[in-house]
Image (cartoon, helix red, strand yellow):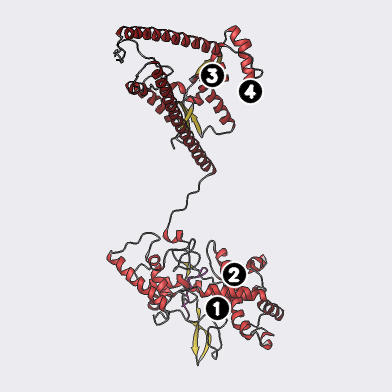
Amino acid sequence: MVSQQQTKDSGSKKLGMVAPQDKSSKEMKSSKKMKFASSSAETEQTSQTTISDDSKTGRGMSTMPRVVKRKLQKLRPIVEYNKRGKGIGQAHSEMQSYIGVLARSRVPLVDKKWSQIPKDVKEQIWEAVDMAFVVGQGGKKSVLTSAAKKWKDFKSTLTRHYILPYTNDKEKLSHPPETYKFIEKAQWDAFVASRLSKDFESVHSQHAQIREKLEYNHRLPRKGYAGLEDQLEETMPGVEIDRSTLWKRARQDKHGNIPDPKVAEKAKLIDELQKQVSEGKVRVDGSKDVLTMALGPEHPGRLRGVGAGISPRQYFNLPKPQRVSFDDRLKESLRVLLQEETNKMEAKAKEEALRMEARTKQLIEAEREHFLSQFSQLIPNFDPGMLKQRISQSPKNPMSDKASCSGGEVKSLHYEDDNAKNGEHQQEEEKEEEKRDEEKEEEKEKKDEEKHDDKVIEVGDYSNMEAPSSLKSLCRYVETTLLPEDKLLQFTIDKEVFGGDRDTFLLHEDITQFAGMEEIGATVVAVYMRYLHDVLKQANMCSMVGFIDPATVSANSGTIAERSRLVAARLQKTDGEQIFMMPYNPGLVSLGFCFYDFQ
């Protein structure tokens, strides 16, 4: 099998046939050979991939006759890729040129977006490339993406070189350029009209301003960063080529110089940083490499010095961001909401306690002042300082604490009255009066207790009570059934509520206390928690919220260590993702709930 290459014969470029080379010649140029899918034939890399006129400078328009001839011979070069999935080698370079030929010749020259081009035209481009090259899995997307860019670049080239310079020369704009004679005149006229419109002039001006802001323009040929990296790996074997080296080499001219002063300054900084890294003075870590230190951090989704189509995550092997499911977000939102409500309840309870304490102090101080003023009127020449210290020491709960009458130290008060007998008689009267006051206080407390007992047992008429209808019905049931027949309300709490089966009951006193907004016991709280569990079960939220039995954490249930073990045992029976509700009494009349998140 033979291969084609371009040769020079008498100053003109012609296509010729070459014989197979010997083994030593193949070994010397093995890195420049293309592999074929249908045979073992190989071809040398040519210095030119175009056919152009000798009198014309520049590359000219590519026609790729070699590709067409290989298609007729059913030879398909295999496109190679580097470790990042970017095409490299001669086959990839020829494929890109062939894609450009197809984009120029097969896509209509209309002022549309690539997404508006008919699908059958795109399919024709892909089929032509697939017949000429072995692209590999997933190659269709990359081929059409490349065709879209080359079609856009082609229109930009026509605009910059063949339309805008001749806006005042209608003769030049009346027919397509000689280089691109395949363009139909009707399409050319429509394209010229669109490029001379005011709308395009505005868009072109905006893009020109954006272009002016680019500081570090590269000088890469068609091979791009991937081809440059492949070339450096051949010339610098065993040396790791990082993106800072690629960025610097991409801005050098063919003599190795950097004409732009700004780029030259950054290249010098890159050399210094690379030296410091090799000496161990500077440490690179992930995306914080030499190029980032020299140019600044990367913008999201973009990476300099590696070419288009490579993201920071792909280059630096960063972990993929974990997706949070809807259930996890809901649990987190509920946890935050419950924590906020708990903090509000605790803050409100503390504020109420401080307000009650301040109010109590004010009442005690006012009572003390009133007592001293009344006492001064009854006793002549009385010094209030004698009782100030003892009266100011008030008990925590003056309603329940009583003063002791036994074992007290009796101090006599001296007055300027010379009649000692009158003083002794007055002391005896005061003692008797004190005794009578104590008896009255005890009798009053006894009556209050009797009234409280009557209030607990009494059911009364709840027809006019401001309460839900269900609560009124429950109270009537207590009045008509439970009290006369001395019955109990029995409940069975399933295992899934508190972690174990439990039977409990309610007395009529529990219901009347609950209806009268009085203090309720742990049994009522447990029954309420069972009802709340049923509501959560209907909403499929039982896996998010759990409950701890009030009977296991009440003050009457063993020691603190025993209660702690019961709570720990309850928590061990869960999956570790529930928010637990446990009743507690913060020291006030109201009942609170303590929330635990054991995630």
Magenta part of the chain: 34-46
Rendered image: mark on residue 466: 4
Residue hosting label 3: 492
> Mark 3 or 2, which is nearer the eye?
3
Question: Which mark identifies residue 148?
Answer: 2
Q: Mark 3 to mark 4: distance in Å?
A: 30 Å
> Mark 1 and mark 3: span between their CA atoms?
88 Å
Q: Which mark is residue 66?
A: 1
Mark 4 or 1, nearer chain start: 1
Q: The C terminus lies in which quarter of the figure?
A: top left
Q: Residue furthest bottom?
A: 10
* Residue 268 appears in the figure: yes
User: In the image, is residue 549 part of the stretch drawn in magenta?
Assistant: no
Compute the Cα span from label 4 to label 2.
75 Å
Mark closest to the chain's N terminus, 1 or 2: 1
Q: Residues within 10 Å of mark 3 (few under 14, many from 20)?
A: few
Rendered position, 159 above or below 544: below
Label 2 SS? helix
Circles 1 and 2, Cβ within 8 Å, touching? The answer is no
Three-letter code for the amino acid on which mark 3 is drawn: Thr
Does the segment drawn in magenta span residue 41?
yes
